[in-house]
Image: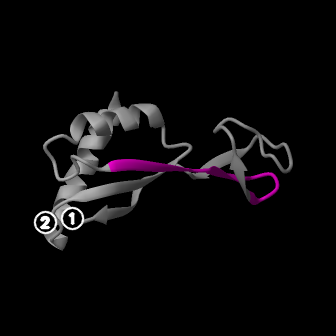
Amino acid sequence: MHELSLCESLLDVIEDTARREGFSRVRVVRLEVGQFAGVELSALRFGFEAVKPGTIAHDARLEIEQTPGTAWCFDCEKTVTLEDRLSPCPLCGGGRVQPSGGTDIRIRDLEVL
């Protein structure tokens, strides 16, 4: 389950940021996870709960916003939102689409003390 290693990396980033910015506790972690990021959200939540004890985020709540997957359609030359990486273009039905967004995982913000 790569979500566990993602959560460990997330906590590393949070703890590095806390040292740099001078906060001692995290109350809320808000993530943006792209629809095409290849992350199982329930596994990510489970992983976060598993790795946060004994860290600066031991009482933190994880909030996840899933961002849509987008792609460039070579047929109609437009950026479109896709439900699935293999879906055809919803505008023209063309099958020549290249994912262009919704592949990221990023920390949107933290509520800290």
* Span of residues in magenta: 61-78
Residue 99 percent coordinates (x, y): 61, 48
Amino acid type at mark 2? Arg
56 relative to 39 in the view: left or right? left
Which residue appears at 31% of the width and 39% of the height?
A: 48
Image quadrant of residue 100?
bottom right
Q: Residue at x 25, y 48 (%)?
A: 59
Name the residue that disc number 2 marks. 19
- Inspect the magenta stretch and tell me whether residue 17 lies in it: no
Which residue is under mark 1? 17
- Where is the C terminus found, in terms of image quarters? bottom left
Q: Quadrant of residue 54?
A: top left
Q: Residue furthest bottom?
A: 21
Q: Position of residue 83 (x, y in %)?
A: 68, 41
Asked whether residue 75 is drawn in magenta, I would say yes
Identify the residue at horizontal 46%, vertical 48% (top origin).
64
Visual colour scheme:
one colour
The disc placed on residue 48 is none
